[in-house]
Amino acid sequence: MKKTYKIDVDCANCANKMEEAANRTEGVSEAVVNFMTLKMSVSFAEGADPKEVMSRVLANCKKVESDCEIFL
Amino acid sequence: MNNRQKQTLVRILVSAVLLAVLHFLPLDGVWGGWLKPALYLIPYIIVGYDILRKAWKGIVNRQPLDECLLMAVATVGAFVLGILKTGDYVEAVAVMVFYQTGELFQSVAVGKSRRSISDLMDIRPDTANLVSEDGTAEEVSPEDVPVGSVIQVDPGEKVPLDGVILSGNSTLNTAALTGESQPFDVGEGDRVLSGSVNLTGVLRVRTTCEADESTASRILELVENASSRKSRSEAFISRFARIYTPAVVIAAAAMGVLAPLFLLLIGRDPMWMEWLMRALTFLVISCPCALVISIPLTFFAAIGRASANGILVKGSNYLEMLADAGIVAFDKTGTVTEGAFEVVGVHHASIDEDELRMIAALAESHSSHPISQSLRRAVPGDLDAARVTDVTEHAGEGVTAVVDGIPVAVGNGRLMDRLGIEYKACHEVGTVVHVARDGSFVGHILIADRVKPTSREAVDGMRAAGVHRAVMLTGDRPEAAKVIADQLGITEVKAGLLPADKVSAVEQLLAEKRGNETVAFVGDGLNDAPVLMRADVGIAMGALGSDAAIEAADVVLMDDNPAKIPKAISLARRCMRIVRENIVLAIGVKLICLILSALGLGSMWLAIFADVGVMVLAVLNAIRV
């Protein structure tokens, strides 16, 4: 399953950091952050609950870039 | 500017003014020298409190190389240096002010370019006028319009959803979809696509799809997702950043620790503070932001620009491959030719040419064969069916009939042979329709596919853009292909190919390509799907509204104008040139600044220029595409 979320982040490198953090999160099979459109599209692993996974993705992203936001 | 940016601007101005005022106050020595740093702390906190907060959070979350942390350490370091030694606090505050100014400028520039590119793709209206049972229109979001409802589109509005016109006549401009600004007329029963602009009349449209499946939404989704398919250059930048960042950190650590230790060992002043500042400067310079933003931004801008021209590029990687296109293979029918068979000439007519055409059209008027339809299109007005009687179709040969009381025969050479009528053969390529009246030959009509008016220009344009081989692949007969190729100035033709043969022909071209160049294939997208997939870059043409083509192709030309091909190639080339410029600019300037700062010639000012200034330059360069 794939879902796209709107995000807010200031710089391109921070967006890359968010992408890495999201990809490290359990339950995410692939995450792509598009800084230009300010969107994050996440493919979830089999059987994962997007809501629960996304809250962890957000927490992980906040860790690497405190100013970022994902609109869930 | 958004609120946050405005707020930052105010903070920058306030602290800059405070800084200037403090500079002129005689503060040295007051309160044992402590008043001065205390007062300077005010503008410093005003302009930099968020940086300090983020730096702290970075430490808590163990993100040691946060840019904010670097800035915080550098400026706090300068403050401490001021207290201990120099008594100068201007640098600490000024560096922070300068840094924030740069960040603000960068964020405004990026936001602006993001918006200007999005404006190019602003094809989806936010509202639809839903017409209810009693005939009144109500403004709703396109998402809330069910399939099969009736919407009203007023002049000047964009069509929000795909549909079929129920009532009304108007002129539509599809420039946003196709890049072609030629408006065209529509009336009852015609299909309209979302994203086109209604120019003249009020239209009532029955919708045929939901909002997210409409043409405008699909195009937008395609373009927005395109920048997620990363190109080789972007992959290179990511890899580079991964090696570069640790390398810079190690270099900085060596500078901050090993250099003074070495000086200490050889018995000289270790200058701890000096080397620490150098190391910090070095780290500030090193931020790879200019690189990581300008490259994707360039691709994004190019993709946006292309879509404004009716060229959809499905990924940055395809833009890159398109720029390297050295061999372009293309289909004939429907790609460089109109794909519709038209009367192109009347030869050897012994009666009036118009009359000859009329006889042929009348005789064939009961047939639905494509040739008959071409004949019918060649005469003006409606046909008077009462003039024709006794029609007999001769399968594979033609028809005989009685027109205006005179027996006529209209068909190919076989029909003439069988009827024992002598006829003149045609030396041109195409389908020949012989016409005989009252048992004798009165001339023949040539029906052929026509080259599109822009095809020649397209082939010349491709050559000018650096394509060294243009190859025509067609299922048509060699003679017919040759005629078209000659008109276009193409020497390489492979004719008589089945769809599978086209794939192997493209595979052969792939095997023959030189170096980095790529093979592009241009087709009409309907029956060329396997070839489109096999080529490095598959370009589908005239794909407006055709899902299959959009699916199979890498680059989609929204209308069927072949002149878009060279345009797409040169746009891709320009994009790649700017990408290379930005790589050189970002890495080159950084490298120079890094070396300068390592030699002690740099300063925090230089560092901020290298970080933010280079980024702004690269962003401005990117949106030139």
Image (cartoon, rainbow, N blue to C red):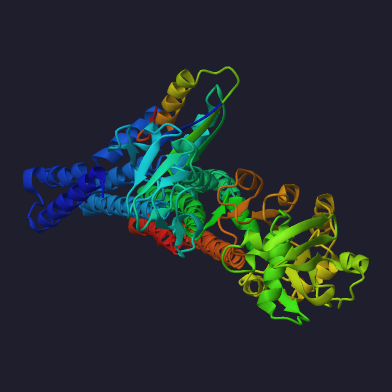
In the displayed structure image, the side of residue A15 where residue B360 appears, left or right: right
Examine the rendering and report whether any part of residue B198 can be seen: yes
Residue B136 occupies quadrant: top left
Along the viewing direction, whichever of B129 and B186 lies nearer the viewer: B186
Residue B462 at x, y = what percent?
A: 65, 70
Which residue: 56% across, 58% down? B559
Residue B368 at x, y = what percent?
A: 71, 53
Along the viewing direction, whichever of B173 and A36 lies nearer the viewer: B173
Residue B27 at x, y = what percent?
A: 8, 51
Along the viewing direction, whichever of B127 and B539 lies nearer the viewer: B127
Q: How many marks?
A: 0
Residue B376 occupies quadrant: bottom right
Along the viewing direction, whichever of B550 and B46 lies nearer the viewer: B550
Examine the rendering and report whether any part of residue B65 can be seen: no
Where is B423 relative to B310, above or below? below
In the displayed structure image, the side of residue B169 where residue B452 appears, left or right: right
Which residue: 69% across, 56% down? B523
Which residue: 81% across, 66% down? B409
Which residue: 51% across, 18% down? A49
Residue B577 at x, y = what percent?
A: 56, 65
In the displayed structure image, the side of residue B602 where residue B222 appears, left or right: right
